Each structure stands twice: as structure tokens, then as C-alpha cells.
Amino acid sequence: MTVTIYDVAREANVSMATVSRVVNGNPNVKPTTRKKVLEVIDRLEYRPNAVARGLASKKTTTVGVIIPDISNVFYAELARGIEDIATMYRYNIILSNSDQNEAKEIELLDTMYGKQVDGIVMMSENVSEAILDKMSHSPSPIVLAGSVEDSKQIPAVNIDYVQAAYEAVKKLIDNGHKRIAFVSGPFTSTINKEHKFVGYQKALEEAGIALDDNLVLAAEDSYDSGMEDFTHANELADPPTAYFTGSDELAIGIIHAAQDVGKSVPDDIEVISFENSKLARMVRPQLTSMVLPLYDIGAVSMRLLTKIMNKEQTEQLQVVLPHRMEERNSTKA
Amino acid sequence: MTVTIYDVAREANVSMATVSRVVNGNPNVKPTTRKKVLEVIDRLEYRPNAVARGLASKKTTTVGVIIPDISNVFYAELARGIEDIATMYRYNIILSNSDQNEAKEIELLDTMYGKQVDGIVMMSENVSEAILDKMSHSPSPIVLAGSVEDSKQIPAVNIDYVQAAYEAVKKLIDNGHKRIAFVSGPFTSTINKEHKFVGYQKALEEAGIALDDNLVLAAEDSYDSGMEDFTHANELADPPTAYFTGSDELAIGIIHAAQDVGKSVPDDIEVISFENSKLARMVRPQLTSMVLPLYDIGAVSMRLLTKIMNKEQTEQLQVVLPHRMEERNSTKA
DNA sequence: GTGAAAGCGCTAACAC
DNA sequence: GTGTTAGCGCTTTCAC
């Protein structure tokens, strides 16, 4: 029914080995033979069975991708970067959502191992001990994309979140603000708690501004949460005049909530987000944002993974991409 | 090095068949034997090789997903619906972006066939003859998600786009508008050209409003394009007072461009979009939108695919999901 | 430049 | 309830 390499061999009067050679572009085949085989392949519409090939060669040309949630623009952008480079190197991607759930992450790693993927790109907001342990026993190489793991045992691609956050907050301070709120997703995310927040504190400290816990709002990363955060913060006796947010959605929520009570952005309050997704340009005022190059992080992660899979000499397993701030209208010049 | 079913069999003093049975939950195993095998599996950290299993059983428990672009919220939502149901039925997903390119779509179908996926969920804005032909020779079942194909040879999950568009435009007409623009992505998309646009025409016709080609703007589906479309349309001698758009981004572009020239939404112009993504609530005014249940379309498509893969009796291969309008503030009550 | 043959790790009859 | 064995479709030595 399905035509196999054996059928092709028989029809072309050659051995399976020869068919295999032409299919795989092995140069050790006489041109006439190659032509004959190719002709039969075409006539029989032979299509190599990748599963059989995977079993025999121990390479599946597929890599696993584990991300929190593909329906979130944030991660979707990352995924696209990964997929583009994967395609370029002829890999396919098995994509799974972890929903940031540790048990699920571990289960997914196991599934990927079982499926014999040639490598894995993973994003996790919190690389726990258990996950780290699971990863260190991985049968195939793993690259962390946009995820920090302090021991640096696992190759990873990131930007300098501390520095980026520092620069954003510094900009707010330079613009004369003393009451600057830090709004982000939950501190269960390592990057929020140990990087962005640290950069925020560093900038405040350097400017001699005392940290005020009332201005640290790390709850949920969503538009609605941003609106609520503004509302709460604005009820303080001494409300913030500037906001540094961990994402675009959060910033938009804050801006809308501010506008709802008649405040003007950037005249009354200034806002800088950390992400710069497509959304940043789709609000009025448009968002000044610290650029998190998600697509690039994905692409570079996948590229790094290909190098490791090919056992190429790779000196730098921890890559730090550059960042920059995109200044728009939610801040004053 | 890697532990195989053979190793487990030897250690547990049973045959490979027995190990296979316990791994696959076959009840024909004596509890004590099962326990012993399980113990060895645990001790040896045996993990079944899915590739070998796939070759032997001719089932890979993975399905292919071909969508235009995962970085677009629109498709990402669809993908999440697919993945959730796939996970529920223990399938993994091989995800690929087609970028709406026919050659790439065909190539991807071939890749999926080669990888022996058990089924495919595909979204395509234009199911060409060539693609249809390729699909009809598919070795595994295919379901089209949110994609129309007139011959209805391929199982598909959609909503009634014509009717939905009709209702949206009707609402605008009922609100007193006579100059209603149709703004969508390109007409290379069957749904734009032969469904939404048809519904638009139907509503106009029914109200005795002549179709004005100047009000039909089918270019690119993006925020910027929306802004440009408004600008152009607004320069007409008799500019539109209402807009029906094919997506949220387009609607937001229009609203912002309108606001930039001092027009108020919904007082001066009214806007209804067709999508209702998360974005719809993240603009001021919030968008009145015809709900396109992408997540559900993805989920139902995958569910349908599981039924077909299991050869369950499935009477309805063409499913039409219900739609509804979410009224917010870009239209008057 | 080409072929023979031994696996890759598992499932699925079939036999007992 | 359990074991034997023949593949699944391909790659990969190793000969020639």
C-alpha cells in the first residue's frame, strides 16, 4: 500500500542502500544510477518514512519547544523566532504549553525525551530544582530561552534584565520623578523578582530614593490587573507620578485607568513598559518601552541549539543580547 | 546506554511482550508480574522510545498543525484551542507556519505525511486546487479549522461568516447609517471575499443601499492599514459614517486615525470589528465586535480530528459553530 | 560505486 | 497469563 524504500529499490534494480544514498544526497552514486532512482521515486511517489529513519539513525530532526502559553503574544513571538530558525535548519517543532506549571513542565520534558527529539528549547519563568535536575539528565541538549537559571548549567539566551530595568527607571528619575511604582507580574517569576525588581531598586538607591513597599505591585500580568494597580496606587496619600511596568498590557491598563480618572499621560503621570510588543504602538499615547527582543531570543536560542546538536565548538553557552529603549509618548522627552 | 524494553524484560525475568503489556496498560498481566515489572522500570528509569513504538504500531500520537503565523494573536488563539484538546487526548502537536504561502503549505503537508502524523489540523485563508489535491491524497485525516473550501470534501469547523457579517452591518444600518465602509484584509482570503463581503453586500441590498466601491477597502490586515484606510475614506466627498472591519487591529487603526482628526467614536463614526480578541477591550472606546471564537474553532477541530482518527461514527463533518455580537462602546446602543 | 545484512526498539499476532 | 517471533522502514557498517 504505502511505497517503501524496498519498492523503489526493486523497481530501479538497485539495492535499498543505493536508494537510501540518493535520498540522503550521498555523493557516492553514479549519476546515471541516481537519475534512474530519482525517476522511480517520482513515479512511485515515494516519500521516506521519517519514523523509520529516526529509529535507524537516532535522529528525528524535530526539536521540542516548551513555553508557558502560546496564546500570549509575548510567548508567541518567541515561538515564531524559534520556528523560523528551526525551519531554516530543517527541523520541525513539537510545541507544548506548560502554563507555568512545574508538574506539567516535567511531564512535558519526559514526553519530549520519549519522542526522541534532537533538542529542546524551553522557556520557564521559574526553573526549579526539580526541573533543573530533570534537565541535567536530558538525553538531548536543552537551551533556555528568555529564562534565567542561576547556576548557569543550562545554555541560555537572555538580555540583561537588571540593567534594562535600571535604565528604564533611571529615565523616570531623570525626568524628575520621586514616586515611581513598580508594576509587574508575580514574583514567582525569577525575572520579575530577581532582575527587574533589582534593577528598579538599584536605580532608586542610586538616586537616594527610599524604597516604598506600597509602590511595589507584583500581582498578575494582565490588562485588568494594570487597571486595578493604578486604582490602588492612586488612592495612596502620596500617589506615584510614574510607573515602570513589566509588560505592555500592564502599562495599557494603567494608562486607561489613569485616563478614566482624568489624568493625562505623560503630563500627569509617565509610564514605561518592558516588552515593546506590537501593542505598544496601538495605544494612545503610544508606549515608551524597554525592548524585550522576544523574536530574537527565540531565534538565537534555536540557533544555539543547532550548534550544540551538531557538536560545533561553541564557546559561549550563556548569551546576553543587547537591549534598548524605544521612546514614544507615554513619557516626556 | 539507553535502557530498552529488552533490558527491563531481562531484569524482571519476563518477556518483552509482558513488559510491553504493562507499559501499555494491557489488563492481561498478573498483578504480581505487573508489580515486578513496574519496579524494574522504575529502578532502570526505563522510558519507552516513542519512535520505535511509532514504527511498530503505525501510530505516532502526534498531529500536525499548519497555520499561517503563530505570532499573530488570531492564529495563536486557534493554536491554543487545538493544543489543549490534543493534550487532553494525549497527542502532541507539530506546529508549522505557512505564512499563507501555497508552496510552503504543500511542502508542510508533505513533511507532515513523512513524519507519519496521525492527523492534521490546518488553517488556510485560501485552499487552492493544488492544496485540495494534496489533501485528498493524504495518508492521514485532515480537518480544516476556520477555513472554507467550497467543495466541502474536507471536514471543517467554521462559523457562518456571511450571516455574522450580515448581522454586524445590519446593526450599523439600524443605527441609521447609509455610508458604511467595509474594511478587511485582502480578497485573496476566501472568507474575506466570499463570506464577509457577501454578508456586507446582502445587508446593504436588503436596506436598499447601493454598493459603493469606494467604501470597500480590502488591503492589508494590520493596525497601520486601518489607519490608512480611514484617512483615505475620510477624504471622500461623502465619507463613511460607519465601519465594519474584518479584524480588531483594523478597527483600532480606524478609531485612532479618526480620533487623530478630532472625530469621536461612536458619536461621529461607529465601528464594529470581526474578531473580538483580547484587544477589543484594550482600546478606548472598547470595540463592539462580532465574536470569532478562534479558541473554540481550534478545540472543536481537534476534537473532530480525534473522532476521525479513532474511526468513530461521525455524522457531521462540516461543523458550524454559533456566533454572537459583543456590544461595547464603539457603537451606540 | 554498489549490495548484503544486521540492527534501531517496539508491537502484535500467535502459540502455549 | 506469558513467551516467541516476525516484522515496521530505514540507516549503516562492511564487503566487494
Image (cartoon, coloured by chain):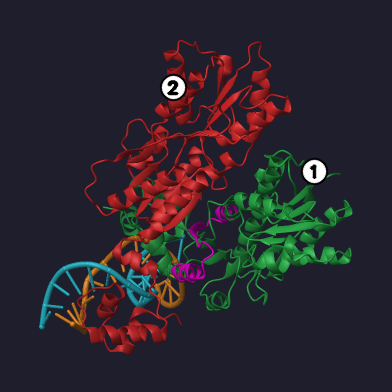
Chain colours: A green, B red, C cyan, D orange
Name the side, left or right, on which B218 lies relative to B24.
Answer: right
Q: Position of residue B309 (x, y in %)?
A: 29, 53
Q: Residue at x 42, y 30 (%)?
A: B161
Q: Position of residue A28 (x, y in %)?
A: 50, 61
Task: Please determine whether, in this image, residue B286 is positioned above or below residue B306.
Answer: above
In the image, A45 versus B153, the foreground residue is B153
> Which mark, by number, is residue B198?
2
> Which mark, by number, is residue A266?
1
Does residue B139 appear in this view? no
What span is colored magenta in the figure? Answer: A83-111
Task: Please determine whether, in this image, residue A25 is positioned above or below residue B315.
Answer: below
Residue B191 placement: quadrant = top left
Closer to the eye: label 2 or 1? 1
Amino acid type at circle 1 is: Pro
Circle 1 SS class:
loop
In the image, B104 versus A254, the foreground residue is A254
> Which mark, by number, is residue B65?
none
Name the side, left or right, on which A250 lies relative to D10.
Answer: right
Which subunit holds the residue at mark 1? A
In the image, A40 versus B125, the foreground residue is B125
> Is A106 within the magenta?
yes
Q: Residue at x 41, y 27 (%)?
A: B162
> Is A125 within the magenta?
no
Name the side, left or right, on which B151 lies relative to B315.
Answer: right
Circle 2 SS class:
helix
Amino acid type at circle 2 is: Val
Q: Position of residue A148 (x, y in %)?
A: 66, 68
Which subunit holds the residue at mark 2? B
Q: Residue at x 36, y 69 (%)?
A: B52
Residue D15 placement: quadrant = bottom left
